[in-house]
Image (spheres, grey):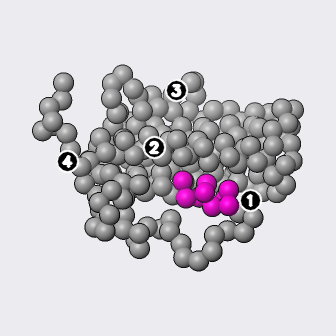
C-alpha cells in the first residue's frame, strides 16, 4: 500500500486560481466575445474544447508517464484514453456510413488500453491516429449539417451523434484529471 509520502504533491500551473489547470488568460480554450452562433457551431465548439482539454492533460509527460496505469487492476492510462478515443471516433463513422464497418485499429476489446505501452513511438502513433480519426469523423459528419437528419439503418440523429461525442470526451477528460493527478500531482479544470 502506498504511503502518503509516496504520492506526488498536488500542484497547479495556475497562479490566479489554484484549482485551475492554467490561468484564465493563458487557457487556449477561453475566448473573448460572443459565443458561437447556432446549435451546430455550439456543439462543435464544445467538442473542440474537450478535445483540447484531453491534449492539455497529456502535455509535458513522457511516454512512461502517459502509459502509467492508474489503480490496479485497472488498465486505464492517459495513453490508453487517447487510443480508446481513436477507436471511438472510428466506431462513430460506422453509425454515419452505409459502407462496411471500419475495423478496430487496435484489435480485440480493451486492446486500446491493454496495449498502451510507454514507448515514444507508441505515443506518437496514438496522437497521429487520433488526429486522423477525428478529422475523418468530422468530415463524415460535415456532409450532414442538418442536426435532425437521421442516419443509416438505426436512424440515429446527427444531433445525437454530436452530443454523444461531447459526452464521451467530457467523461474521459474527467478520467484524465484523475490520471494526471496520479502521475505528477497536477490538478485543475
**Nearer to us in this view, 113 or 39:** 39
Q: Earlier in the sequence, mark 3 or mark 2?
A: 3
Where is residue 167, by image quadrant?
A: top right
Disc 4/disc 1 C-alpha distance (Å): 41 Å
Q: Is residue 6 left or right of residue 41?
A: left
Front: mark 3 or 2: 2
* Horizontal arrangement in the rendering, residue 107 relative to residue 80 (left or right): right
Residue on which disc 2 sits: 174
How packed mark 1 is, by other alpha carbons closer than 10 Å (few <14, some 14-19, many 20 or more), is some
Q: Nearer the viewer, mark 3 or mark 1?
A: 1
Q: Which numbered marker is on residue 110?
A: 3
Alpha-carbon span between mark 4 and mark 2: 19 Å
Q: What distance separates the C-alpha of mark 3 from that of mark 4?
A: 31 Å
25 lies above or below 112: below
Does label 2 or label 1 sit earlier along the sequence? 1
Marking on residue 9: 4
Residue at label 1?
Answer: 40
Q: Which residues are magenta?
A: 42-50
Amino acid at each position: 500500500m502506498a504511503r502518503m509520502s509516496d504520492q506526488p504533491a498536488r500542484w497547479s500551473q495556475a497562479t490566479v486560481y489554484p484549482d485551475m489547470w492554467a490561468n484564465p488568460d493563458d487557457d487556449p480554450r477561453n475566448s473573448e466575445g460572443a459565443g458561437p452562433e447556432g446549435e451546430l457551431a455550439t456543439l462543435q465548439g464544445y467538442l473542440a474544447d474537450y478535445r483540447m482539454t484531453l491534449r492539455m492533460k497529456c502535455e509535458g509527460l513522457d511516454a512512461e508517464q502517459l502509459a502509467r496505469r492508474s489503480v490496479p487492476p485497472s488498465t486505464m492510462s492517459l495513453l490508453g484514453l487517447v487510443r480508446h478515443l481513436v477507436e471511438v471516433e472510428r466506431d462513430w463513422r460506422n453509425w454515419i456510413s452505409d459502407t462496411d464497418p471500419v475495423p478496430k485499429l487496435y484489435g480485440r476489446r480493451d486492446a486500446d488500453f491493454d496495449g498502451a505501452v510507454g514507448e515514444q513511438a507508441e505515443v506518437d502513433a496514438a496522437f497521429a491516429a487520433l488526429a486522423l480519426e477525428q478529422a475523418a469523423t468530422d468530415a463524415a459528419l460535415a456532409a450532414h449539417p442538418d442536426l435532425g437528419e437521421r442516419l443509416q439503418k438505426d436512424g440515429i440523429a446527427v444531433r445525437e451523434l454530436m452530443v454523444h461525442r461531447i459526452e464521451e470526451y467530457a467523461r474521459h477528460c474527467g478520467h484524465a484529471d484523475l490520471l494526471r493527478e496520479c502521475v505528477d500531482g497536477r490538478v485543475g479544470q
